[in-house]
Image (spheres, grey):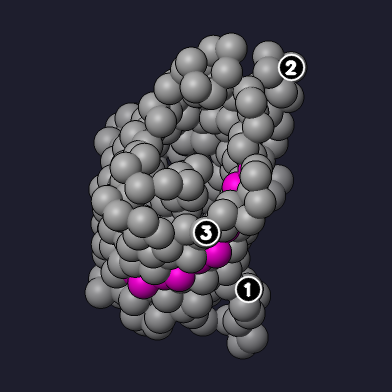
Amino acid sequence: MNRLFTRLLSASSLLLACAACSIYTPMTPHAPIIRAQGEGEVSFQLQGTGRAELQAAYSPCKSLLLLAAATGRPKLFTDSAAIDPGDGLRTLQYEVGAGTYFPMGERWSGQLIGGFGAAQVERTVSEFGIFLAFSNNYNARYQKYFGQISFNKQLHRHGMGFGYRLALIDFSELSAQNRQGDYTLYPLPLDSQLRHELFYSYRRWLGRELAESHWYLQAGGGLSFCLPGRTDPVPYDDVDFRARFNRGGVVGIGYSLQKH
């Protein structure tokens, strides 16, 4: 386990460089290992950007799964701090969902989940060439509607999962303000977008056997992208150029302590 987490921590410094390629800031898709009525999970997760996330899931009756999650991150540095995509991130989000789970043999299980949520995000997006080439403060509010499928495998001391989520993002507010020169504020088109999100997780039980331990550590990651992705407009347009940053990919890594 220690070796696995060490590798993930070392990889996160590379992956987080891509974490701010979009103003859209996805939450971690929730795929708990629940196989029976009355089972539930609560988890506290810390993203690589310092964003905290709380998730809960419960099965009140056979094959029914209810989920809820919330996440938040205050702005950690002032605007006078060194320009860093992570420094300009501020967000508050929630999502709720419901679905079903189904056993697939002794160790495997599957889930089908649908849900909705909302978010407000402030994020500094910067790109560098020889010198600073682009830096804008983005503000966004959006609602999301999603469906996902996931699969989990449960062993005596380990667990793993992976899945796919399709999310429809509806923006109610989207703007960008130049951080250089005239500090022009650009209202951006409120175009909806479909997001494809792939995710995985690995967990390690904190105890001899699952029956003797209700706590575990989990590491996971995901990729969010839309099609077509980000391209530069031809001919160049100030508004269109800034809007297309919102079609970039997002890579994330998170670590959590969970109770089953």
> Mark 3: few, some, or many residues within 10 Å (few <14, many ≥20)?
some
Judge by depth and name the residue closer to the eye, 80 or 153: 153
Do the CB atoms of the residues marked 3 and 1 lie less than 8 Å apart? no
> Residue at label 3?
102
The residue lying furthest to the bottom in this view is 235
Does residue 214 sit above or below 227 in this rendering?
A: above
Q: Is residue 147 magenta?
A: yes
Disc on the earlier residue, 2 or 1: 2
Does residue 55 sit above or below 187 in this rendering?
A: above
Compute the Cα span from label 2 to label 1. Answer: 35 Å
Q: Residue at x 34, y 76 (%)?
A: 170
Whole-percent x and y of residue 149?
A: 55, 64
Q: Residue at x 45, y 70 (%)?
A: 147
> Residue at label 2?
3
**Circle 3 sits in a helix, a strand or a loop, which is it?**
strand
**Circle 2 sits in a helix, a strand or a loop, which is it?**
helix
Disc on the earlier residue, 3 or 1: 3
Judge by depth and name the residue closer to the eye, 52 or 57: 57
Do the CB atoms of the residues marked 3 and 2 lie less than 8 Å apart? no
**Amino acid found under the numbered disc labelled 3:** Phe
Compute the Cα span from label 3 to label 1. Answer: 34 Å
Compute the Cα span from label 3 to label 2. Answer: 32 Å
Residue span colored magenta:
144-153
Mark in the foreground, 3 or 1: 3
Q: Is residue 133 magenta?
A: no
> Mark 2: few, some, or many residues within 10 Å (few <14, many ≥20)?
few
> Residue at label 1?
229
Disc on the earlier residue, 3 or 2: 2
**Taking 17 as reference, is 90 left or right?**
left
